[in-house]
Image (cartoon, grey):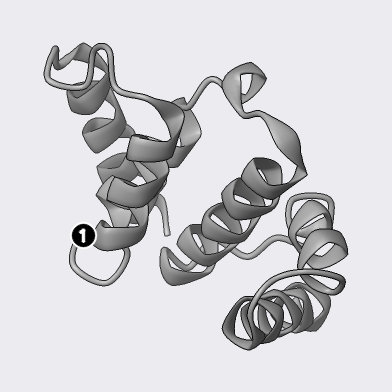
């Protein structure tokens, strides 16, 4: 577990110091994090944790960030017991969104409650 956190911190430091992401939008970063989720899950989590959350606009954007963040945490083996991260996604996708988004929201909420 400590080794995984060390790897995540290293990737985060490298990505933070890299100039290749300067000027990208929040949406582009979220899309990139989602694409990397199954390939390089630690990089995906690093992208999400360095995002400036104040630039995320609207309920849809906050729901997308919440869902991707919850998935990244789960795929990196980081167990959380508070549903505060996924709550915006569950709230938004239970009313709007595709069946896939709803089911992912419910699944990762269940994973959190399992922890």
Give the side of residue 54 with respect to residue 43, left or right. right
Residue sitting at 61 percent across and 60 percent down?
67
Residue 17, x across and y down, in percent:
20, 13
Tell how many labels.
Answer: 1
Residue 96, x across and y down, in percent:
78, 69
Residue sitting at 12 percent across and 20 percent down?
20
Residue 37, x across and y down, in percent:
32, 64
Give the side of residue 66 with respect to residue 3, left or right. right
Residue position for label 1: 40
Give the side of residue 4 with respect to residue 11, left or right. right
The 10 Å Cα crowd at callout 1, few under 14, some 14 to 19, many 20 or more, is few
- With respect to residue 81, does 20 lie above or below? above
Residue 88, x across and y down, in percent:
80, 52
Rendered-image quadrant of the C terminus: bottom right
Q: Quadrant of residue 80?
A: bottom right
- With respect to residue 74, does 62 lie above or below? above
Element on which disc 1 rests: loop
- With respect to residue 113, does 9 lie above or below? above
Give the side of residue 3 with respect to residue 56, left or right. left
Kindly tell me whether residue 3 is visible in this rendering: no
Residue sitting at 59 percent across and 19 percent down?
55
Q: Nearer the viewer, residue 80 or 94?
A: 94
Residue sitting at 43 percent across and 70 percent down?
75
């Amino acid at each position: 577990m400590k080794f995984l956190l060390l790897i995540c911190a290293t990737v985060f430091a490298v990505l933070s110091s890299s100039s290749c992401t300067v000027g990208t939008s929040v949406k582009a970063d979220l899309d990139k994090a989602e694409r990397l989720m199954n390939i390089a899950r630690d990089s995906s989590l690093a992208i999400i944790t360095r995002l400036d959350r104040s630039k995320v606009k609207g309920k849809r954007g906050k729901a997308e960030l919440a869902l991707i963040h919850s998935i990244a945490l789960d795929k990196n083996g980081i167990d959380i017991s508070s549903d505060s991260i996924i709550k915006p996604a569950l709230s938004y996708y239970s009313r709007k969104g595709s069946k896939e988004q709803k089911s992912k929201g419910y699944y990762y909420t269940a994973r959190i409650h399992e922890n």
